[in-house]
Image (spheres, helix red, strand yellow):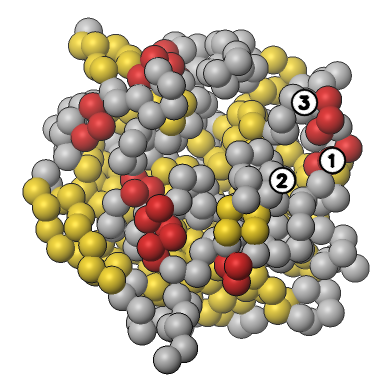
């Protein structure tokens, strides 16, 4: 009997153990599809993950422009956060510790002595509840929800989180991430960690893709990729993408590739243009907008011999990530925009992806 494809919606469902309200419950893990015009996007509620984004190129040929896997099991074993929502706090926290309101919190480290993307079992490694699922209509959408208990991975306070993905006319995908602190102040910094390759997930590296970032400053890091606390100008550095440049034009000036947070220009808290990515071979263009103060530009430096969709093997620079976010390690840098969320004042993080074709 032929192997059942992961992408046959509703035919491949596994049962997994989830943690909700501090107790184990059984949740179903499945695949869900949204379609609008000639664009289709698939998700799994394991990690509230984007598993495919299918769009035509300039010749009208459909292609999948995000990296991923052929089975849910591979997502559960993934160590690169491919396509998932990461949290409670995305990016790094130095020493896996911080002090808030006079209380010192020790978290669970998972990158040396530091914490990365929420710890050993962050939001990317849990089963989310499917709260709403609307396949059809003017704005097809799906909403995932997760309840993070007080003390999870060492973080204070219970937290209710939702992530809503919606397709709009004109090949637009919106991502709305919300969180509500239920009983204590807590740091919250969610990020969507899709690996993009506008030429198709199996088209090789992204060094020829052109990137423009609307950020005149960035946050320099030490050898462990922990911010030093400085907010520096990009002028005169390989990090300057104020004017469009190909990814590979200056990457050899860096030791491994891009993995850096940018301080975005524009009004804090307001939706603003963040990035434009162009792939001239396919003609695909992706514009990104967000209300967050920062974006992590990452060129998949850590991928090596990762077996992906259809058996294609992903290597370093096979994709790029644009993770809109609060600044990394902001809990330990008072000069950075605060990522602390208090009861009665919710966290709201919006991303808008707009796709088009350029000749």
Callout 2–callout 1 Cβ contact below 8 Å: yes
- SS assignment at label 3: loop
Label 3–label 2 contact, CB within 8 A: no
Tell me the residue that label 2 is attached to: 317
For the residues marked 3 and 1, what is the alpha-carbon distance in whole angstroms? Answer: 11 Å
Instruction: Give the class, few, some or many, for how many residues have Cα within 10 Å of label 2's Cα (few <14, many ≥20).
Output: many
Question: Which of the 4 image quarters holds residue 330?
Answer: top left
- Please identify the quarter of the rendering in which residue 257 is found: top right
Residue occupied by mark 3: 254
The numbered mark at residue 33 is none
Q: Quadrant of the N terminus?
A: bottom left
* Most distant residue in the left direction: 23
The numbered mark, 2 or 1, whose residue comes first in the sequence reads: 1
Q: Is residue 155 left or right of residue 313?
A: left
Residue 10, above or below 270: below
Question: Residue 320 appears at what percent x and percent y?
Answer: 67, 47
Q: Specify the label residue 248 is tagged with.
A: 1
Report whether 326 appears left or right of 317: left
Residue 121 screen position, x and y as percent: 31, 41
């Amino acid at each position: 009997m032929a192997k059942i494809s992961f992408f046959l919606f509703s035919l491949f469902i596994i049962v997994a153990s989830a943690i909700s309200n501090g107790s184990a419950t059984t949740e179903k893990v499945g695949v869900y599809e949204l379609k609008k015009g000639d664009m289709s996007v698939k998700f799994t509620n394991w990690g509230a993950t984007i598993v495919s984004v299918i769009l035509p190129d300039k010749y009208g040929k459909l292609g999948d422009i995000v990296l991923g896997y052929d089975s849910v099991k591979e997502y559960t074993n993934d160590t690169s956060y491919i396509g998932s929502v990461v949290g409670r706090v995305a990016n790094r926290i130095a020493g896996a510790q911080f002090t808030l309101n006079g209380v010192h919190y020790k978290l669970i480290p998972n990158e040396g002595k530091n914490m990365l993307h929420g710890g050993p079992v962050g939001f990317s490694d849990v089963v989310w509840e499917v709260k709403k699922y609307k396949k059809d209509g003017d704005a097809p959408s799906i909403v995932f929800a997760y309840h993070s208990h007080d003390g999870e991975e060492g973080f204070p306070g219970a937290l209710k989180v939702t992530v809503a993905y919606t397709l709009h006319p004109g090949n637009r995908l919106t991502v709305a991430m919300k969180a509500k602190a239920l009983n204590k102040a807590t740091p919250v910094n969610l990020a969507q960690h899709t690996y993009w390759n506008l030429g198709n997930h199996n088209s090789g590296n992204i060094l020829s893709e052109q990137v423009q970032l609307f950020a005149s400053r960035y946050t320099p890091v030490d050898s462990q990729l922990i911010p030093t606390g400085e907010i520096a100008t990009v002028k005169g550095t390989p990090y300057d993408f104020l004017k469009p440049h190909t990814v590979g034009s200056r990457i050899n000036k860096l030791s491994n590739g891009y993995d850096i947070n940018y301080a975005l220009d524009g009004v804090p808290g307001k939706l603003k243009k963040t990035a434009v990515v162009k792939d001239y071979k396919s003609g695909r263009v992706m514009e990104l907008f967000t209300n967050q103060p920062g974006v992590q530009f990452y060129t998949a430096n850590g991928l090596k011999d990762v077996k992906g969709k259809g058996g294609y093997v992903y290597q370093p620079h096979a994709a790029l990530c644009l993770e809109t976010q609060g600044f990394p390690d902001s809990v330990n840098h008072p000069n950075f925009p605060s990522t602390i969320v208090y009861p009665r004042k919710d966290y709201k993080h919006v991303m808008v992806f707009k796709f088009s074709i350029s000749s």
